[in-house]
Amino acid sequence: MKKLICTLIISLLLCVFKTHAQSDLCISSIFRDYGKQKGVTLVELSKDMLKGYNITFYKSITFKDITPYQSIILECLNNDKISHKARKIQEIVDDGKIISAYYQLPETHQKDKKILKRYILYKRGAKDKATLVYIEGYLDADQMIEMLFKP
């Protein structure tokens, strides 16, 4: 009976960690701390919606005015890029500030031996609007770019 209970607890913990895989990233605090602020839109898509895209997790946060949050977001982007040894696919810097970034984090291996790829995207638009996106899935970088920029 003890063995069964331990197995159930471990299984539940693994499920919790799997559904919050971005929690090891600094940007997870951006989603958590600012997702319900006025002027901010938080989007998390269900697995059912993502199924056809080879994506297992999608979360984005859009700020109507990035100004009050810009320094913490750029700090988190830089921290995650360095501490997780992210591959820089694209990065555009203007006046010393990142205005667009596309990073691929190191792959993780799932229990079923599939390789999960993780991406962070950031784009600052006109009138101080900005979007931060975290994606997990089985897409390689080229497939991700094709999907994002497909007409």
Image (spheres, rainbow, N blue to C red):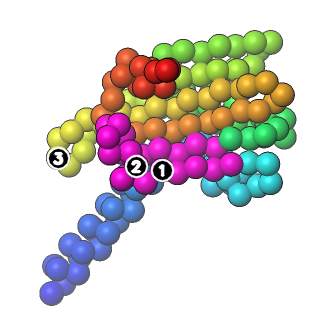
Residue type, label 1: Leu
Q: Nearer the viewer, mark 1 or mark 3?
A: 1
Residue identified by numbered label 2: 49
Q: Is residue 107 visible?
A: no
How far across and down, in percent of the image, does residue 23 sit?
50, 50
Which residues, given as a range, are shown in magenta?
A: 41-61
Specify few, some or many for label 3: CA neighbours under 10 Å numbering under 14, 14-19, or 20 or more. few
Q: Name the spot of residue 149 as percent of width and height, x first.
A: 50, 20
- The residue type indicated by label 2 comes to Met
To which quarter of the image does residue 64 belong?
Answer: top right
Q: Which residue is mark 1?
A: 45
Residue at x 25% of width, y 35% of height: 115
Query: Where does residue 55 sit, x and y in percent of width and height?
Result: 36, 40
Relative side of 127 to 32, left or right: right
Q: Which mark is residue 112?
A: 3
Residue at the location (37% across, 52% down)? 47
In primary-sequence order, the first of circles 2 and 3 is 2
